[in-house]
Image: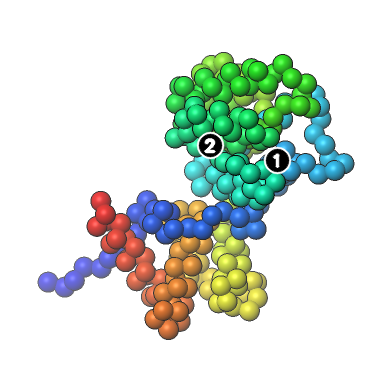
Amino acid sequence: MPPTKTAPPRPHQLPLALLAAAAPRLADGMVGRNEAALASLRQLVQPQPGLARPDDREPWLLLWGEPGAGKTFWLQAWAHALEDQRPGLQVLGSSAGTHDFAQQAQGPLLLIDDIDQWAGPAQQALFAHLAQQAHLPKGRMQPLVLTSQGPAARLQGLREDLRTRLGLALSFELHRLSEPDMIQAMRQQAHGLGWMAQPQQTDYDRLFEYLVTRLPRHLGLLKALMKKVDERALAEKRSITLPLVRSLMDELLNQTQASL
């Protein structure tokens, strides 16, 4: 009986954690169609002289969008970029407890990921904090950035009073990068890894198109896989080719299945 061919890995079968992606950096992000959202994010977390936010608006920002839109990436990238100015700043995810929240609520900036996934006690703590902040002059309120999979009005998993309060936040949808955006980002990554002399070259576009059509459009995942490919090519003294990428993806898939 002839051997069967290995099917291309399905998106969920190559988890980002397995690829040990590097910590997000602002320089690794691509804006795509998110210019206004990311400009508002920058101005909130790192105000620029002459562009101060209006004092008549709460310094709250809600970034929402489907998985893979970059919500977690941008929060973590900013937390890393600000770590020298704001020691102890962390992104609070859905697993954060009330103690974690209480610690971050004392700082100059609050970054909250996946608010729609937060448990009841953490939601209660956030609502109490925002209610307390509401008594301050808006220019003295703690800046807050949150992410979710939908706008405040559609977050059915939230307490009604918290959802109403978050409706006051400036809100932007984050859009996933288009295929051309992803390929350009991968060209830049390839240039940084030394695969080609200029980031505009199209030498590896066939390989990039293969990855974009077979994996989630998650830039961190794709960049992490490219680094793995680069390490494998150096270790085995091989050229960067589609067969090399396929063999590495098969190996990672086998490791994933063995760990289940």
The local secondary structure at tag 2 comes to strand
What is the crowding at mark 2: few (fewer than 14 residues within 10 Å), some, or many (at least 20)? many
Residue at 50% from the left image edge and 71% from the top image edge: 206
Residue 45 - label: 1
Q: Which residue is situated farthest in the bottom direction here?
A: 237
Q: What numbered label is drawn on residue 92?
A: 2
Rendered position, 103 above or below 215? above
Given the image, on which type of amino acid does mark 2 rest?
Leu
Instruction: Give left or right: position of 202 versus 54.
Output: left
Corner quadrant of residue 126: top right
**In the image: residue 199, left or right of residue 13:** right
Horizontally, is 198 left or right of 65 in the view? Answer: right
Residue at 55% from the left image edge and 28% from the top image edge: 102
Residue 191 appears at what percent x and percent y?
Answer: 60, 72
The image quadrant of residue 202 is bottom right
Using the rendered image of the protein, determine whether residue 242 is visible from the camera's viewpoint: no
**Label 1 sits on what residue type?**
Val
Query: According to the image, what is the colour scheme of the structure?
Result: rainbow
Q: Nearer the viewer, residue 158 or 125?
A: 125
* Distance in Å between CA atoms under marks 1 and 2: 15 Å
Look at 63% across and 30% down and name the residue there. Answer: 106
Q: Position of residue 242 (x, y in %)?
A: 42, 74
Q: Secondary structure at mark 1?
A: helix
Q: Where, quadrant-wise, is the N terminus in this rendering? A: bottom left
Residue 250, relative to residue 195: is it above or below? above
Of pointers 1 and 2, the one earlier in the residue sequence: 1
User: How busy is the neighbourhood of tag 1: few (under 14 within 10 Å), some, or many (20 plus)?
Assistant: some
Coordinates of residue 216 in the picture (x, y in percent): 45, 53
Q: Are marks 1 and 2 in contact (CB under 8 Å)?
A: no
In this view, 5 is above or below 143: below
